[in-house]
Amino acid sequence: MLSTKPIDASQLTFRYSGTGEHYEYDRDTEKRAKDQTRHKDTGYLLWKVRCVAVYRAGGEHGEITVTVPAKDIPTADFDAEIMFSGLVVKDWSINGNQGQTWHAESFAALDAMPSRASTPASAGAKKAAAADSG
């Protein structure tokens, strides 16, 4: 059973810790694919972006891995602040095991973007996109 929920990242800060290749797992063969998995719509390679997610208001944090499609390997300086757009979490339960997988439409390092001065991440992304196209 899968349940997908959008994430309001406006109260979260993400700190980059690394990127790895994503290989799909085949439940029938119980093996990983030999080739790096591609996004079904864009054809871009799927990457696993590891980061620390910090909930500022609650002072809580934890390491998560977010699957992101990208033309080029998504990277940033270690511990740099990053953001994801279209962030969702999928809760799953299979054969008595439970967990979550995180997915996003895109990834960006904030040091490569104009200052977002305490605006929510989604609004900051829209402002950055507007500035780039203007």
Image: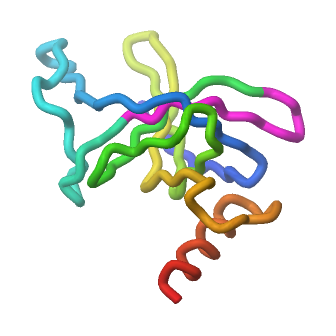
Q: Is residue 27 left or right of residue 47?
A: left
Q: Is residue 47 left or right of residue 106?
A: left
Query: Height in image: 129 above or below 96?
Result: below
Front position in the image: 28 or 18: 18
At 84% from the left and 39% from the top, the residue drawn is 56
Q: Position of residue 74 (x, y in %)?
A: 40, 45
At 23% from the left and 59% from the top, the residue drawn is 42
Q: Position of residue 72 (x, y in %)?
A: 29, 50
Residue 94: quadrant of the picture: top left
Task: Looking at this view, name the residue that lies furthest to the bottom.
Answer: 134
Residue 127: quadrant of the picture: bottom right
Q: Is residue 80 left or right of residue 38?
A: right
At 54% from the left and 38% from the top, the residue drawn is 77
Name the main secondary structure of what is drawn in magenta: strand
Q: Position of residue 116 (x, y in %)?
A: 73, 65
Query: Height in image: 26 above or below 113?
Result: above
Q: Quadrant of the N terminus?
A: top left
Residue 50, magenta (yes or no): yes
The residue stretch that appears in magenta: 48-60
Query: Height in image: 39 above or below 41?
Result: above
At 45% from the left and 10% from the top, the residue drawn is 96
Residue 128: quadrant of the picture: bottom right
Q: Position of residue 114 (x, y in %)?
A: 65, 68
Q: Tell me how many marks there are.
A: 0
Front position in the image: 15 or 32: 15
Residue 37, magenta (yes or no): no
Query: Height in image: 97 above or below 123?
Result: above
